[in-house]
Image: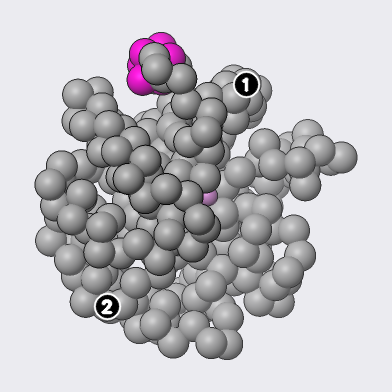
Amino acid sequence: MEHFNNIFDSHAHYDDKWFDDDRADVLLSLPQKGVCGVVNNAVNLQTAKTAIEYAEKYDYFYATVGFHPENLSDITPDYLDEMEKLLQHKKVVAIGEIGLDYHWDIPRDLQKREFERQLAFSKDMDMPVVVHDREAHGDTMELLRKYRPKGLVHCFSGSRELMKEVMRLDMYISLGGVVTFKNARQSVEVAAEVPLDRLLLETDAPYMAPVPFRGKRCDSSMIIYCAEKIASLRGITTQQLLDITRENDLRMYDITQ
Ligand code: NI
């Protein structure tokens, strides 16, 4: 692969234990590979604090604060107060990842209640949200229509009709490694049609590595394979797509670089 720059990863998890052996090496190497931004997504308070520590060390690194639907057993009665304190940090750029996950057997009333609380909180705080929607499109959209937050739907897995609904809410979608997979018909259709000013790129590192690294540990430099695929669908160069999506990230997360 040739060298690219302006690689902005809208969604990653560098606190994951898969990086425990060489995290500092990886994080130091990414800027040399053209990575100019990474938004590390929290799944609970501990991962938010860890991401803030990395963000203090690495210029290009940003953090979010929020409770993922799979981590709701960690919530305390005053968790929104704790989140509010962490949001004061200048490198915390969104509330996430929050949402609904109907793939796993987690009580749906609990998921919806805490998603709603965090959506309402994002409005109070005037912060964008990073939405996780796994096999829960109907309920997720219903709550997004109700609260009208700023933000993005990450690892977008819906149809083009659903993508258009997200556009009508003035939100963004983020696409990752799936778009390079052989069976990714729906993702490819969405990538071919989404307005280019509403598209973000992500890895969800360390998971979801694009082809040719599928199944291996992913890092933000691998975004170029997703960018290459989407750029070819759109008739622009890979670097042009990287430039556009970086601008979108800066606008959406309200980051100045
Ligand atoms: Ni994630």
Determine the secondary structure under disc 1: helix
Q: Name the residue under label 1.
A: 53
Tell me the element at label 2.
helix
Can residue 33 be seen from the camera position used here? yes
Is residue 51 at least partly visible in the picture? no
Q: Is mark 2 within 8 Å of ligand 1?
A: no
Q: Residue at x 24, y 71 (%)?
A: 162
For residue 217, which quarter of the picture? bottom right
Q: Nearer the viewer, residue 142 or 250?
A: 142
Residue 165 versus residue 241: which sits nearer the camera?
A: 165
What stretch of residues is rendered in magenta? Answer: 80-85
CB atoms at circles 1 and 2 under 8 Å apart? Answer: no
The percent position of residue 119, horizontal first and vertical second, equals: 26, 37
Q: Mark 2 points at which residue?
A: 160
Q: Is residue 93 left or right of residue 169?
A: right
Q: Is residue 110 above or below residue 236?
A: above
Question: What colour scheme has been applied to the protein in the rendered image?
Answer: one colour
Spatial distance from mark 1 to mark 2, Cα to Cα?
38 Å
Image quarter of residue 211: bottom right
Q: On the picture, is 78 further left or further right than 216?
A: left
In front of the other: 29 or 122:
122
